[in-house]
Image (spheres, helix red, strand yellow):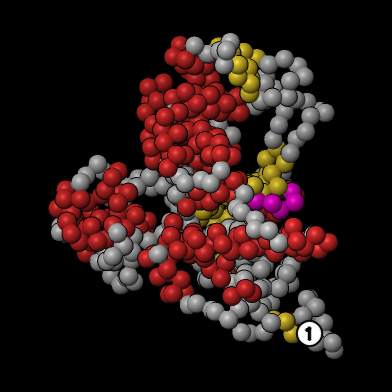
Amino acid sequence: MAIGKLYIGRKVRELREANRATQGQFAERIGISTSYLNQIENNQRPVSAAVLLALAEKFQIDIAELSTGEGDRLLSALSEALNDPLFETYSPSLQELKLVAQNAPGLAHALITCHQAYRRNSEQLASIDDTIGRGASFVETTPYEEVRDFFHFVDNYIHEIDTLAETLAADLGLGEGDNHTALAAHLEQRHGVRVVRGVAGDEAIRRFDPRARILTLNPYAPAPTRDFQLALQIAQFHAREEIDRIVGSAGFRTEEAHEICRLGLQNYFAGALILPYQSFLKAARELRHDIELLAARFGASLEQVCHRLSTLQRPGQKGIPIFFARIDRAGNITKRHSAAKLQFARFGAACPLWNVHQAFETPGRIIRQLAETPDGVRYLCLATQITKGGGGYRANHPRYALALGCEISYADAFVYADDMDLGNRAAFDPIGISCRICERTKCASRAVPPLKRKLIVDHDMRGSLPYRLSES
């Protein structure tokens, strides 16, 4: 087995803690010394092939799981930051970036944060040229972005919340059945909260009166939305202490970020309660990730199912590494997570060649695409349009496209890949992450030039673009 040096201390530590073992117990089980395990967990030494094989044999995990995840996300964000013209005199190799991401993740996060502040500051200066003095002030990461990055870099999986929700789901008999009755009964019997229907004209999806202990749900909201809101209300009671502990230890800089994260963790609990980890993972494998059948079996929406598939990252019990995104009609990515190598751009729009944009043209259908990124990695990409809201003809009905996919090596686990020519490289569309960091030189759909390529303008010849890109 030929492997590069892998510094996966955090993943090894998570696997040990998930099995509730001390360092001594864990080291003995995989046949190494406690001191060696300690060095591995602190990224002072890489894991050897023998240790990888022992982990795979003793804990029934896929070796590939150990070499992907946060490192890929951090590497992608770091690479995008260093592609900025600000660093035009410095072009680190991929190996250098990997060393930083693996051995000094704190430094990598700090650099990414500084780059975000620099970009916001530059954009402010460019747009307010008549008030340069005020525009030059330092602009911090917004609370929303800070929370988004928190979930992004913990692999969109919160073990304590997930297992807490799964235990309660088992106690309530949730999963495949009438979740609404069970959730409403639990709220009334355990927390003294009565669930009632809303009145006409009240646009709130959920409204809780803590004094009267009454939870009002919008009767026109879809059934999966109402069930989710019941589960979210339960999260506020059942998971309060655990959520407060996680929020308190996250190191957010503002109270606003604390509250946004608290809401995000409540939503996470609600999704894990309605779609319990092990039963949902088992069903996903049995149904070969048919999202429509999964939604029907669990009484969930397509978005809830797709989002949950992207969170199946429990150490030792991982699902397929999936990327997931929700995109509005303007191309804004409003939700995103990737457990695959494909990482979404932090700045700029998504690649125009990605099939997610076509979903708005074919409502009600799941469209498929075989795609290849500039690094040579190939993917199965799925996209479908959803419509939010309810309330009749005059109500707002925002439309979004859901994107879901995996690396082609996992495509056999998806029903959508059955009749596709996976072995034909010519069947794969060339896509990128975003135009500003995509290195493809002959893309007619390019919106802006890449940041680190010089432009060649030929006044005597015009191609699909008004310029050509230098080869280096």
Can residue 279 be seen here? Answer: no
Q: Which residue does the image show at 17% across and 56% down from the upper left?
A: 34
- At label 1, which amino acid type do we have? Val
Q: Which residue does the image show at 47% across and 52% down from the upper left?
A: 153
Left or right: residue 468 versus residue 172 is right
- The quadrant of the picture occupied by the C terminus is bottom right
* Disc 1 crowd, CA 10 A, few/some/many (<14, 14-19, 20+): few
Please tell me in which quadrant of the rendered image residue 276 appears: top left
- The quadrant of the picture occupied by the N terminus is bottom left
Residue 276 shown in magenta: no
Query: Chief secondary structure of the magenta span?
Result: loop
Left or right: residue 27 versus residue 430 is left
Q: Residue furthest bottom?
A: 460
457 vs 295: above or below? below
Total labels drawn: 1
- For this rendering, which residue is in front, 143 or 47? 143
Residue 331 shown in magenta: yes
Left or right: residue 45 versus residue 69 is left
111 vs 224: above or below? below
Please tell me in which quadrant of the rendered image residue 372 appears: bottom right
Instruction: Look at the image and give the residue range highlighted in magenta.
Output: 329-333
Q: Position of residue 262 (x, y in %)?
A: 52, 36
Can residue 222 be seen here? Answer: yes
355 vs 283: above or below? below
Q: Which residue does the image show at 26% across and 48% down from the upper left?
A: 16
Q: Which residue does the image show at 45% across and 34% down from the upper left?
A: 243
Q: Position of residue 6 (x, y in %)?
A: 33, 66
The residue that mark 1 highlights is 457
SS state under label 1: loop
Q: Position of residue 2 (x, y in %)?
A: 30, 72
